[in-house]
Amino acid sequence: MSAVKAERYAANEGYGEDFLGLVPKPWLVSRLKDKATFNPSKSEIKELPKECTFAPMEKLKTDSLLTDVTVIPSNISGSYTYFRENDLLIAKVTPCFENRNVAIAKNLTNGIGFGSSEINVVRVSKKANQRWFFYLFLSSGFIEAGASKMAGAGGLKRIPSIFLETFAFALPPLSEQTAIAAYLDTKTAQIDRQIDLLSQKATQYGKLKRSLINETVTRGLDKSVPMKDSDVVWIGEVPEHWGLKRLKELGDLYSGLTGKSGDDFSQENEHGEPFVPFTNIANNFYLSTSNLKLVVIHPSEKQNYVKINDLFFLMSSEDYADLGKCSLLTEEMKKKTYLNSFCKGFRFTKRTVNPKYINYLLHSTQYRLSLSNEGKGFTRINLRMDKINDMRLLIPSMSEQQAIAAYLDTKTTQIDRIVTAINTQINKLKDLRKALINDVVTGKIKVVSEGAAV
């Protein structure tokens, strides 16, 4: 393999100009249909193997396809996409397409793969460098052009097949394609290693935060106090003077919006009022008062509205990870605000509890697992109201609850700041990766082979 380097084009090399704008003079404008074939027919398979690889669209997140799922081809219906080793796979549906879900099919079981019908298969000519095209499909120019052609009803939109066939780009000579691919392989791998190390660091801080919450809400701040059995198997021992209360003894659950149709969730209606969406609760420990949407509430309508110190539970979810999650409202709302129909609100009526402490308690691993294990369902998992009401909660004295909540607010905020700083670094590296790919595959930076073996 030859070493490669990046440099600017010399003044005498310059750029030519065509309908794509400025491109390096040696590069030729091409269309994908001239350099590749699309979505090959399953009829080219002469004999079906006993097993092959299956690829969901969501798995197309790296240059090498994840190959841990094998299937029996005879069980696959005719609507699935067929591909083979080294084919390029591109998601065609939002948001996967816009998230650059692109992969090269590698290490397929028996050399054959099937995937979602929402995958486009591109088979690059043997006279072109496959990995150069892989980076082309990750470039902003390709993604933005495809996104502009997307169409479809509802939340999902698809890029039409004609877009792939007619997509125009500037193609360098084969030797330069190879040099570019090798250069980007090296540089993106370096960036990816930095991202991976930072991600591991963020994960460790996340574990530290969970451990801190788990320990504090079940053991308290004074580790010298005598302990007793809590009488709850999955909690174990707790401070001797702590009590147990069921949630229903501390207040009342209330329902979210009822009797609403899709037409009621309009952003341009004179009766539009704010409501708390599902994602606000799923993503926030303390409810975000700015992350609200609008729903039509007529003056004569009676719906429950939220108040400060209300706790909100996700009662329905597509997976167990979010089921039963809660979020606490710690600010007064400027106007009446309602709750989405997938959630329940809980209003504390007893002054012997601190809502912040209860929120931390319910975010501990023990309580999260207990609630998610109560879920029932297949396509959508639901949690019964009585499972929330009957939760047995650890209740220290009011002064201890306040001290625990204040301590955890301080400590978790410190950890969150560190994680935010790490994620900022990660996002900068991701932006750098995108910019590097864009500059190189569009010829803004020249990549050449140095001819030295490495």
Image (cartoon, rainbow, N blue to C red):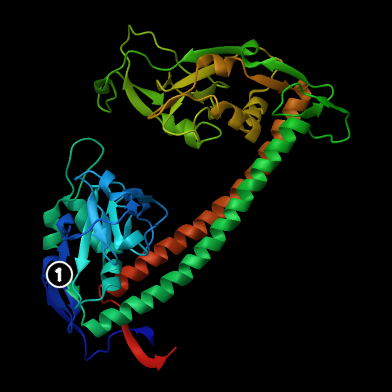
Q: Position of residue 9 (x, y in %)?
A: 28, 85
Q: Nearer the viewer, residue 306 or 365?
A: 365
Q: Residue at image x 63%, y 19%?
A: 391
Q: Classify residue 267 by image quadrant.
A: top left
Q: Residue at image x 13%, y 77%?
A: 17
Left/right of residue 99 with respect to residue 364 in the rendered view: left
Left/right of residue 144 with respect to residue 321 in the rendered view: left
Q: Nearer the viewer, residue 292 or 82?
A: 82
Asked if 403 appears above or below 118 in the picture, the reply is above
Q: Position of residue 416 (x, y in %)?
A: 60, 46
Query: How many discs appear?
Result: 1
Q: Residue at image x 16%, y 44%?
A: 151
Q: Residues within 10 Å of mark 1 (few under 14, many from 20)?
A: few
Asked if 200 appears above or below 233 in the picture, the reply is below
Residue 104 in view: no
Q: Position of residue 424 (x, y in %)?
A: 50, 56
Q: Classify residue 348 by image quadrant.
A: top right
Q: Nearer the viewer, residue 155 or 32?
A: 32
Helix, strand or loop at label 1? It is loop
Asked if 446 appears above or below 367 in the picture, the reply is below
Three-letter code, disc 1: Leu
Q: Classify residue 89 by image quadrant.
A: bottom left
Name the quarter where the C terminus is drawn. Answer: bottom left
Left/right of residue 196 with respect to residue 105 in the rendered view: right
Q: Position of residue 414 (x, y in %)?
A: 65, 47
Q: Which residue is mark 1?
A: 20
Asked if 7 appears above or below 287 in the picture, the reply is below
